[in-house]
Amino acid sequence: MKEKISDAKQELKDKYYQITATVIENQDVIDQETLSAGRFILATNVLSEKELSNEEMISKYKEQQSINFGFWILDFRLTPYLHIGA
């Protein structure tokens, strides 16, 4: 059974749009946001970059965060209510 499409709906389906834009950096806003951006420090007891490079350390940190988030989702789904407060 084929659904009959009204002329108005068919006309909307047949329209295509093309958008052209120009992006201009506002350096004042970029500088202000950069100054207010947060920072974080990763510390390790592995002092040799041959054992653990900066890129590897950040990668392992991000992997840990995704694992922790996965456990939070699992815990959230198993818990009948969300504990708020202490």
Image: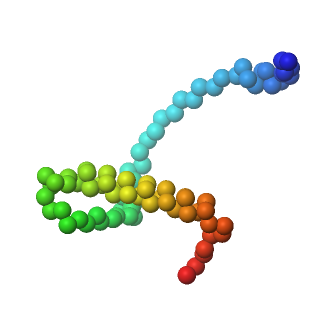
Task: Name the image colouring.
Answer: rainbow
- The residue at the far bottom in this view is 86
Q: Is residue 31 visible?
A: no
Q: Nearer the viewer, residue 25 or 68?
A: 68
Vertical side of 55 occupied by 80: above or below: below
Residue sitting at 25 percent across and 51 percent down?
Answer: 56
Q: Position of residue 21 (x, y in %)?
A: 52, 33
Vertical side of 42 occupied by 5: above or below: above
When asked about the image quadrant of residue 43, the answer is bottom left
| Horizontal relation, residue 45 to residue 70: left or right | left
| Horizontal relation, residue 1 to residue 54: left or right | right
Residue sitting at 66 percent across and 69 percent down?
Answer: 81
When asked about the image quadrant of residue 66, the answer is bottom left
| Horizontal relation, residue 66 to residue 44: left or right | right
| Horizontal relation, residue 2 to residue 16: left or right | right
Q: Which of 34 and 58 is in front in this view?
A: 58
Residue sitting at 34 percent across and 64 percent down?
Answer: 39
Image quarter in which the C terminus is found = bottom right
Number of numbered markers: 0
Q: Nearer the viewer, residue 52 or 7?
A: 52
Q: Where is residue 52 in the image (x, y as percent from the top left)?
A: 20, 54
- The residue at the far top in this view is 2
Image quarter in which the N terminus is found = top right
Residue sitting at 55 percent across and 63 percent down?
Answer: 75
Q: Can residue 36 be seen in this view?
A: yes
